[in-house]
Image (cartoon, helix red, strand yellow):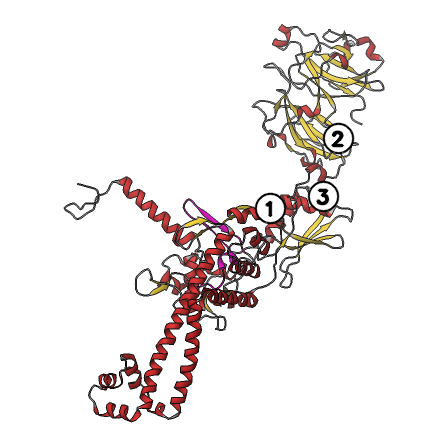
Amino acid sequence: MKSGELNFEGVEQRPLRAFTEKAYLDYSMYVILDRALPMLADGLKPVQRRIIYAMSELSLGNNAKHKKSARTVGDVLGKYHPHGDSACYEAMVHMAQPFSYRYPIVDGQGNWGSTDDPKSFAAMRYTEARLQPYADTLLSELGQGTVDWVPNFDGTMDEPALLPARLPNLLLNGTTGIAVGMATDVPPHNLKEVVNACVRLLDEPDVGIRELIKLMPGPDLPTGAEIITPKADLRSIYETGNGTYRARAIYELGDGEIIITALPYQVSGSRVQEQIAQQIRAKKLPMLENIRDESDHEDPIRIVLELKSNRVDAEQLMTHLFATTDLERTYRVNLNVIALDGRPRVMDLKAILSEWLQFREATVRRRLEYRLGKVLSRLHILDGLLIAFLNLDEVIRIVRTEDEPRAVLMARFSLSHEQAEAILETRLRHLARLEEMKIRGEQAELAAERDELQGKLSDRSQLIALIRSELIADAEKYGDKRRTKLVERSAAQAIDETELLVSEPVTVVLSTAGWVRQAKGHEIDPKSLSYKSGDGFQSAARGKSTQQAVFLDSTGRTYCVPAHQLPSARGQGEPLSGRVDPPDGATFAGVLLGEPEDRWLLASDVGYGFVTKLSDLYSRNKAGKAVLSVPEGARALAPTAVPSSDQALVVVVNTEGRLLAFLVSELPELTKGRGNKLFNIPTAKAESREELLVGLAVVVPGNKLKVICNDRHMTLSFADLKEYRGERAQRGAMLPKNYRKVTALELADAAG
């Protein structure tokens, strides 16, 4: 059986591939042509067109009384658009919102949403609506033979295929839509500017697109604000039909305040406030005291930012907010519309205006031809009536005596069927003598109108002049000033987080269980803080709140957390493992804090180490950065700062109580690796963990070294270390007998 043939049961059989391909193509074309993309002619999608037409049929003009929105939606669904009521009502609401449409088409009464939440409108059973005066530009010529009519979905009535738009509504209100394989994003524009471009194109059809762009230089958004995209980029959008532009909020400076008075298109004020409030709570905006909303009916947008002092650079702050919040936003432009030939395509500005003017010329021509037909028909009737009045007695006789007066009248006076019918339908009271004068007067008026119409239809220059004058008249009636300023500015840049912070001294404290916190100032004694049961002090580092705290784990990996983001030392902190992701079984050996160029000594308990810069330990990865190579089973020691002194000594001590001091200059400066041998531990003992390093410190003249042995300690001055001096990788000298069970080395002033 061949594809497409019927079998014995009357069922058509087709290959699955052919069926699915056709079904998908049909669906795609339906979505593209009947749902997502607007027509260039009237700038409307089918649901919008049907809503406007249904409201006109319900006599909901701008002078009518508002009617329930549910009534309109019911008519649209029942007669023209058999789809969901919520989608239909939402399309109707969109056309009524002054913050969504540059020139609203529907006049709503009730809750129709707000800029903060456009979808917060009330249900259609509560709201009422009628058409705005602007809707006249779409509907006024509808009954004048200007457009084609097509059957509705069930064939019971007709609906207009297009609305006879007197203005290029596509560019005025813009549109967005996503179809199958294509999308459209047309921004709104200013009516007067668009009309000026149309008039220029009528006067000079060969005018260049750059000249048109001078007349309509960019989008005009309903909510105002300012477009900061360079003119060259805007010109590229109109020349290619694709591109992006950026819109930015407008603000003014008050007494210690920044007042935001306009937001970009489709930006929620409450959303912006929440974004700023989040940064305030995260301590990323220390120069801001508070944010409050003073918006009301008189000032729809008035967001006030309270500054902590008059010394705050307001412009720098706003630049940061533009970059980190919706106060500055990028919009895509894709001038993809259904052209007059019924095919979707991306068009440049001149192509859009030229095709729309072709549509407008055809519409006006059809309007004039329709009117000319009406005038000629009426003149024909008047000619017949005049014959009747001139032969009134004969006409009366024929009507009274003849069985078929229409046929006799047509034969007697050479009348047409329409003329004879009009004579027979004339009332007796219209047979007065004055009626002849009225007929001749109406004939004269209609004859003059006929000549005028024929002149315009036969002379294209007159037709163009008429279109031009009508465009200018509509621009004067419905146009307004530009709301969106075009100000060329560079894109906003976020301020570095450290620049926004107040630099203050802090102490970062790490516990043996891996809990971390930061205290303000350097005077705090980390050991005096309260710790959880079974936990205790492990390591502390002093620096500034604007610096990165670097944590070293037992496997030799380093992790970074901004110091100001750590929890306050008023509590017991939080687990560091919640912010970083160390390997299983790893513990934290210590914390480092300081300037990026500061030098630190890293070492493992098997006796190897090296000096490195703090900046080499920074890592953005939550899993850290491998820096110190630690053999399996070994552990990293707590890092220690290396002062810039030629006499600085590295002091290490092992589990047997041997202490060695040697110059820091004997160690290499590396970025990562195992390092050099600090202390001579036999390999076999290191692998069996019989002998290990337990303490590490760097001492300079003036420092004292505290050798801690559980609950006891001894203090060695810099001069005392001469007894333990040697070269790197030696075994050092034994400590006194009672101080050989060393648990840690500390500088005597380490606790303040």
Residues at marks 1 and 2, CA–CA distance in whole angstroms: 48 Å
Location of the N terminus (image quadrant)? top left
Which of the pair 268/239 is nearer the observer?
Answer: 239
Q: Is residue 473 above or below residue 688?
A: below
Which residue lies under the disc numbered 1?
232
| Circle 1/circle 2 CB separation < 8 Å | no
> Could you say where residue 527 lies in the image, as x and y percent from the top left?
74, 28
Whether residue 362 appears in magenta in the rendering, the answer is no
Q: Is residue 277 above or below residue 723?
A: below
Q: Residues within 10 Å of mark 3 (few under 14, many from 20)?
A: some
Mark 1: amino acid: Ala
* Residue drawn where x is 62% and y is 63% of the image: 297
Which of the pair 472/257 is nearer the observer?
Answer: 472
Span shown in magenta: 163-188
Callout 2: SS:
strand
- How many numbered dots are placed on residues in this image? 3
Which of the pair 294/31 is nearer the observer?
Answer: 31
Whether residue 184 appears in magenta in the rendering, the answer is yes
Q: Residues within 10 Å of mark 1 (few under 14, many from 20)?
A: few
Which residue lies under the disc numbered 3?
286
* Residue drawn where x is 26% and y is 83% of the image: 414
Which residue lies under the disc numbered 2?
543
